[in-house]
Image (cartoon, rainbow, N blue to C red):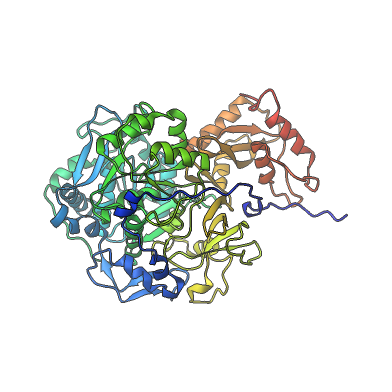
Amino acid sequence: MQTKEITEVTEAQIAVHWQEEEYYYPSIEFIAQANMTDESIHERFSLDNFPECFKEYADLLTWDKYWHTTLDTSDAPSWKWFVGGRLNVSYNCIDRHLEKYQNKAAIIYVPEPEEETQQVLTYRELYVRVNEMAALLRDFCGLQTGDRVTIHMPMTPELPITMLACARLGLIHSVVFGGFSGKACGERIADSGSKVLVTMDSYYRNGKLLDHREKADVAVQIAANDGMEVEKVLVWQRYPGEYHSENPMVEERDFFVNDVLKNYRGARVEPVSLPAEAPLFLMYTSGTTGRPKGCQHSTGGYLAYAAGTSKYIQDIHPEDVYWCMADIGWITGHSYIVYGPLALAASSVMYEGVPTFPDAGRAWRIAERLNVNIFHTAPTTIRMLRKAGPDEPEKYNYRFKHMTTVGEPIEPEVWRWYYEVVGRGEAAIVDTWWQTETGGFLCSTMPGFQPMKPGSAGPAVPGIHPIIYDDEGNEVPTGSNVAGNICIQNPWPGAFQTIWGDRERYVKQYYERYCKNPESKDWRDWPYLTGDAAVQAPDGYYRILGRIDDVINVAGHRLGTKELESACLVVPQVAEASVVPVADDLKGKVPDIYISLKPNVEPSREVEDAVVAAIVDNIGKIARPKHVYIVPDMPKTRSGKIMRRVLASISNGTDIGDVTTLANPEIVETIRKMVQGEEEVDFFG
Ligand code: WT7
């Protein structure tokens, strides 16, 4: 018998076993008020009407100069939308609402400590504060249109104020999630070439006022090692006038924003009129190689797409109180806390802290107090709230008309709790599938006229035309429930423009695999590879199975296995590291780490701890592994490739499959016993 060498199979090839779920229909009340109940929208946005259909989204914005070309493909696959048009994002999110809504809440901020009252920023107040901050960035920092600014901040109103101030001037912001380490921030400063870092001294998380400013010193140092000198560090104070950090301010480099702003009181800054394709921001995300990549998003296309999807899929009306409980440091927060909702003159709620602080009723108390009627969160949070207080929602008097789940697949069981208990069987749910790169939703039901199906993201949203390919590039038959690599056939306005400073990687990673002709300027030749595996049911609904590349999705946040592995290798005793996703009740997936040690090094608890510390230092607490296993050797193919898939099966207790053709098959059983051994799972634990 011929033995075939084992190679790593993709997620797409993993069999799927689940049953079809029943439909749930939106209520009459929801339909009666929905922004979109016209089923012909999918027809209007069909491929026959592409790309002109997206005029409908562009027309939600106010243009200084109207555009002449809907889609320019001459630089394929970097697509240019609404070419010839000029606009300003801060104008679209603030100024244009003033006449009608100046006194309406734009941002409602809820601090974590319950005794601190919420703050309401009206559109007028947002206008004043964004103008003053823009004046400071321009005149005090000397920043000019096109310069990058890294913002490493927690969830406080000063974060969107800073973002919108950047947008007013055409500065490209790069917001780094506040929970990330100083080192992760420093790498992103260096990659983006930011001369200015905006941060905050401290913030509340789980009842503790954390020192955040200390990370800035690490960040500046890391950036300097990489050749990027940060000129100014702007430090907002969580409590103006008080400084809560162990690290002293650095003279000539660090400035308290609240102090400097006094010189700009009442300043007004004319919004800079920018070409539609000018970059608005960078959002770093993990890829298959160690280095995070800066997804570059545009001004006109991005805002049009964020506004359009916020209106028709989030069903936001100006009268609604909309609460997306994500962090603005992720793309969800950019598109669906800040830019989309504000472009529609909504009232957007921001919460500083942990959803279960000080108890499992907190989220529902906020909803009750503010009369929130649209609620948006991730499966990981839903699982956490369900575990911490399954009956809590009933105790509070709120009423949601619409709820969103985003970031990872949601188990039908959890979906039903969300629907029945949180949404009281009244709220329409959208399960929105998309990515940092895509700027806005790709798949979701249209809440006003398409039924929900637990565990399925739904059909593609208007103007998005997915196609599922197998590994050989054959199209998987439509509606066949056969798994494959889901791609998008056509460009859309929200799509990122490139990877900052690395177009080659952009083309290679997202377009090369199924490209029909690399010379082509026709978008039909450039399907976009999402990196997810999916199946499509006969009713057209897509179910997302997970990533096909080496990315672990922890609690809706994406971590590159390579990034984690390189952090492990920082520990001097570690020879090899392999990181695999392991199922976790709350977070969906968490990393399990396998390491082998250098010769003559004995396994010890210290090494395990050092690996965990390295992960937390280099990436952040979010990446904290579930276990660290010190193994005598890694299972490898004969070509020396570590078989992650085998390790993942061991961690998850699933079928390991045939390993006889490995270079060292005997190691598999040794590791399995070590990990699954009856007595102890974590053998130093
Ligand atoms: C990856 C993108 C989109 C904002 C949050 C995450 C997974 C996202 C869903 C969903 C199943 C989902 C995919 C995707 N994902 N939404 N509704 N159902 N999986 O953004 O960090 O760029 O991660 O998250 O695997 O590729 P991101």
Note whether residue 211 is visible. Answer: no
Q: Quadrant of the C terminus?
A: top right
Q: Is residue 584 left or right of residue 298?
A: right
Residue 569 at x, y = what percent? Answer: 59, 40
| Foreground of the two, 422 or 272 | 422
**Residue visible at 31% across and 42% down in the picture:** 199
- Front-most of residues 95 and 228: 95
Number of numbered callouts drawn: 0
Query: Farthest right residue?
Result: 1
**Rendered-image quadrant of the N terminus:** bottom right
Rendered image quadrant of residue 79: bottom left
The residue depicted at 60 percent of the width and 47 percent of the height is 19
Q: Is residue 17 above or below residue 539?
A: above
Residue 207 at x, y = what percent? Answer: 34, 26
Q: Quadrant of residue 152?
A: top left
Whether residue 666 is situated above or below residue 165 in the rendered picture: above
Instruction: Give the percent coordinates (x, y) of residue 295.
Output: 43, 57
* 475 up-or-down from 179: above or below: below
Q: Nearer the viewer, residue 320 or 684?
A: 320
Give the residue furthest to the front: 28
Is 301 or 307 nearer to us in this picture? 307
Q: Residue at x 32, y 60 (%)?
A: 303
Q: Is residue 415 visible?
A: yes
**Where in the figure is residue 642, as x and y percent of width and height?**
69, 46
